[in-house]
Image (cartoon, coloured by chain):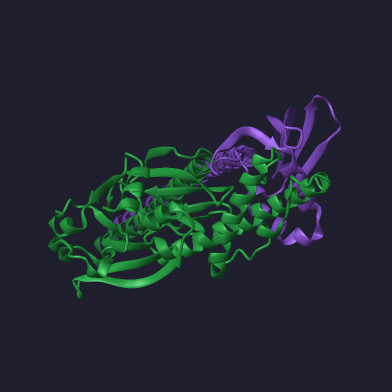
Chain colours: A green, B purple
Amino acid sequence: MNSKKGVIEVQFNWVFILIAGVLILLFFGSIVLKLKSNSDTTISNTILTNMQTIMAGAEVSSNTVTPISIPDTKIEVSCDSISVGSITSDITKNKIVFAPEIIEGRTMLTWSLPWGFPYHISNFLYMTTPNFKYIIVDSTKGKEIYYKLPQGLTKQLVDKNSLSDLSNSGHKLAFVFFNDPEPDQASLPYFLENMKDNEVIAINIDSGNNKISFYQYKKSLKNFEYFSDAPYLGDEMIIGAMFSGDAKNYICNLEKALKKMEIVSMVYAERTEELQRIFHSNPSCFYTITPFEIDYSLNNIDAIIDSKRDLEIRNENLQKASCPTLY
Amino acid sequence: MKICKKLHAQHYIKMKNKKAQIKMFETIAVLLIFFVLVGFGLIFYMKFMRTSIEDTGEHQFDLKAIQTAQLVSFLPELQCTSPTSANIVIDDCFDVLKVKALANISKEPAYERINNEYYFDSFGYSKIYIENIYPYSPENWIVYERTLPNKKFQSSTKVPVSLYYPVTNSYSFGVLTVEVYG
């Protein structure tokens, strides 16, 4: 009887220790997990805060290339938000950011260019990584774009006949064609077949029609497949299309740029009305708000281009007549 | 003799039971004290974290205030530009006609949608105004205003700017004030 009780007591002790041990382990385990998730959130928040600061800085100081060391995390960039892990931060309506959908790696390159049409409207911010290689097909416009791109960027100017001689450098590739040839008519290097479809994109610039066409490489076709097209206003937008590589993202940024253009034009129209009131008795200083009063939408790109030309001529005439200029 | 042995055994079992009970209470007491200490630790940690979060909030607000001031200083709607090139802007210089135009636009109810949708997205709850300082004139223009009724924080940043008058082709000295509420 005595030894039986002893056995029960000993067993009970072990069960008690086991339950208590499991509870203690669970308690500390949950604390560790909670701390880990808190720490991840803090890191994501810090990255996003820094990104916002970088974007604010780059937006106001144009023509500056800044290489930024980033933690080895995936940064997802869309037209109106930027996410790290589960944390998302909005990109405000006045910030126009052209970037690939996913930024990975240890270094991020940020660069900004002023955009005016014809007056200064905004600074475009471009983000990419050295993992992306921009292959520009040699042409007059191609050279112009190539030399506009900053030094820190992985870029190559290639003759249209030497495209098939390109070798694999381990980069994701963005081809820029200038209608001669079009991406789906070019002879492409064989190593593209060993790359993932989303690692190779192409854009085609049709300068005559101010149109950019977006293409995606398809292994199954061993060629580029046409995706969609969109208009552009200035070289800064061609560079934007190169950096985003995605029609949806590009068009969203283009719409943001047009909205900004509408607001800035509104200020210029109001300013011109004031000049009209001041100089109404001076026939050599002729002011009109007509060129500003247009529809700033994607469907009206031709009218926007015409208005730009009109404004440039009017501004030049006012300058020649020693009158205050429109912009 | 037998009875004595039996009594002794019973007494021994009772003693052992009591000892086991005491041991168990001891263990429970140790566990209780342990969890109470852990609880205290957690309470202190939470308090520390709360202070740290409040500090971060203030830091974020300061950062936002500086970003807003920076954004306004380089706003294309206000900046002086070169008539020869679209992309040459003159830093820390505001075109007075543009300032007046933006101030008028921000007042007009027809442009409320732009103020609400576009500028609020960039400037949030803040007041942005420009004053002419030298040569003195009582001119000042509010280019954006959206106050927050129950504000916890307020930051005021003043940026010296030159004001360009295109009609007379002259400059004066002004101050841009950006008040941000949080």
Residue at image coords 46%, 60%:
A232
Q: Is residue A301 above or below residue B36?
A: below
B74 sits to left or right of A216:
right
Q: Hey, which residue is sitting farthest right in the picture?
A: B138
Q: Is residue B94 left or right of residue A281?
A: left
> Residue B144 in the image: x percent, y percent?
74, 47
Horizontally, residue A147 falls left or right of residue A51, namely left
Q: Quick check: B75 above or below B169? A: below
Rendering coords of residue A149 (x, y %)? 36, 44
Q: Say which of A4 and B95 sits in front.
A: B95
Residue B18 seen in render: no
Q: Quadrant of residue A209?
A: bottom left
Q: Name the quarter where the C terminus of chain A is drawn.
A: top right
Residue lying at the far bottom in this picture: please name it. A220
Residue in the foreground of this view, choosing between A185 and A175: A185
Residue shown at the point (32%, 40%) measured from the top left: A152
A28, B58: nearer the viewer? B58
Q: In which quadrant of the rendered image does the N terminus of chain A lie?
A: bottom left
What residue is drawn where x is 60% and y is 50%?
Answer: A313
Count of marks overlaid on the render: 0
Residue B132's x, y, as percent? 79, 31
Quick check: A80 left or right of A286?
left
Q: Can residue A216 be spotted in the picture?
A: yes
Residue shown at 81% from the left, 56% from the top: B108
Rendered location of residue A52, percent (x, y): 51, 45
Residue furthest to the top: B135
